[in-house]
Amino acid sequence: SSDLNFILQFVSGMSSLSMLLALRFARMARFVRVVRLIRIFKELWFLVEGILASLGSLVWAWLLLVVMMYIAAIFVTQLLGQQHSEDELMSAYFGSMPHSMYTLFKVMTMEGWADIARNSLKVEPWSAVFFVLFIFCTSFALMNVVVAVIVQNTVTHAKERKDEEVSTQEKKDTAAMGKVLEIFRTCDVDGDGDVTKEEFLDAMKKPNVMQLLHEVQIDVRQVESLFDVLDYNNSGSLDSEEFIDGIMSARGEAQARELLAAQCDLWKDELQIKASLEQIEDKLVGQLQSCRRIVSNLHKDVLSASAATAQDL
């Protein structure tokens, strides 16, 4: 009975532990999903996805590295470990295959490789060439290839993700443009190709138009002032190009609408300045012509006076 109670307690403890681990994994998965949505961690997620995409290449690279270390371990075990078994250091470094593999791993990671090579050089002078070649083939060559594979996969994955985002955004813009065109056709009641302010405000009273504006991310609370913003030339009407370009530019966050309003204000000021300059130019041209007529009349009077004076003499 005591054994049965112990087993039941053990099983219940294991189930509680499994439940706790499952909850922790669920929290971690939720945290990872949140991290993916935060823009500041975008580059970090690209790096993680690049490493995950490189797992296949990394497995083959590490397998090749293990094979190279195994072949080198056989070589040093035979020529350094067994032939110099009386040497304590050689026996500790290369006395058996596991010892040789561990020592070569330390050499590959550059951890104390100088001391290992120096002690080996005392018993076998040619070992210096071996360690230099081993480091070149593993640390400098193969490990750099591993890093290059990770970087290449990360860059490729980031480019593919960027292309997907661009393609998705283009599809969204195309769909939004179709909805904006439908709004324009609904507003253009008389079908003359222009939308007046009265037609625009009347269309805004229709639920389907407000729904389409909401779907294209237009703030329907400020839709009444939208026409004045888009009509930057104060013509009182909008053609299809002005309407579609303006609505597409006003989509999204409030900052985009504020920028569009500022840009339209600049366009209005530019048109007003051009009109004022044209008026000033017309006035200057008129005054110059008046001056020319006055000068011409004066010139004629001077000539007439000179001719009369010459006759009197």
Image (cartoon, grey):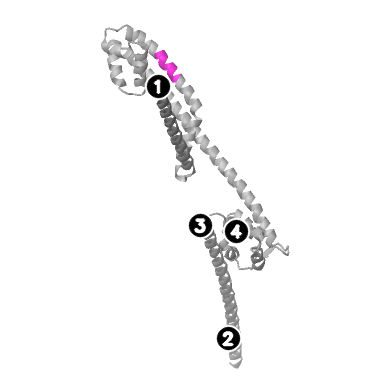
Q: Earlier in the sequence, mark 4 or mark 1?
A: 1
Main SS of the magenta segment?
Answer: helix
As rendered, which of 99 and 264 lies closer to the eye? 99
> What label sits on residue 1 in the rendered view?
1
x and y percent of residue 176 in the render?
62, 52
Name the residue tied to disc 4: 246
Amino acid type at circle 1 is Ser
* Crowding at mark 2 (Cα within 10 Å: few <14, some 14-19, many 20+): few
Q: CA distance from mark 2 to mark 1?
A: 142 Å
- The image quadrant of residue 15 is top left
Name the residue tied to disc 2: 302
- Quarter of the N terminus within the rendering: top left
Foreground tag (4 vs 2):
4
Q: Earlier in the sequence, mark 4 or mark 2?
A: 4
Secondary structure state at the residue bearing disc 2? helix
x and y percent of residue 278 in the render?
58, 71
Q: CA distance from mark 4 to mark 1?
A: 82 Å
Name the residue tied to disc 3: 255
Secondary structure state at the residue bearing disc 4? helix
Foreground tag (2 vs 3):
3
Q: Is residue 56 left or right of residue 89?
A: right
Amino acid type at circle 2 is Val
Q: Earlier in the sequence, mark 3 or mark 1?
A: 1
Q: CA distance from mark 4 to mark 3?
A: 14 Å
Q: Earlier in the sequence, mark 4 or mark 3?
A: 4
Secondary structure state at the residue bearing disc 3? helix
> What label sits on residue 202 in the rendered view?
none
Amino acid type at circle 4 is Gly
On whether residue 53 falls in the magenta region, the answer is no
Identify the residue at horizontal 46%, vertical 41% (top origin): 35
Which portion, as a residue range, is magenta?
Answer: 64-72
Secondary structure state at the residue bearing disc 1? loop
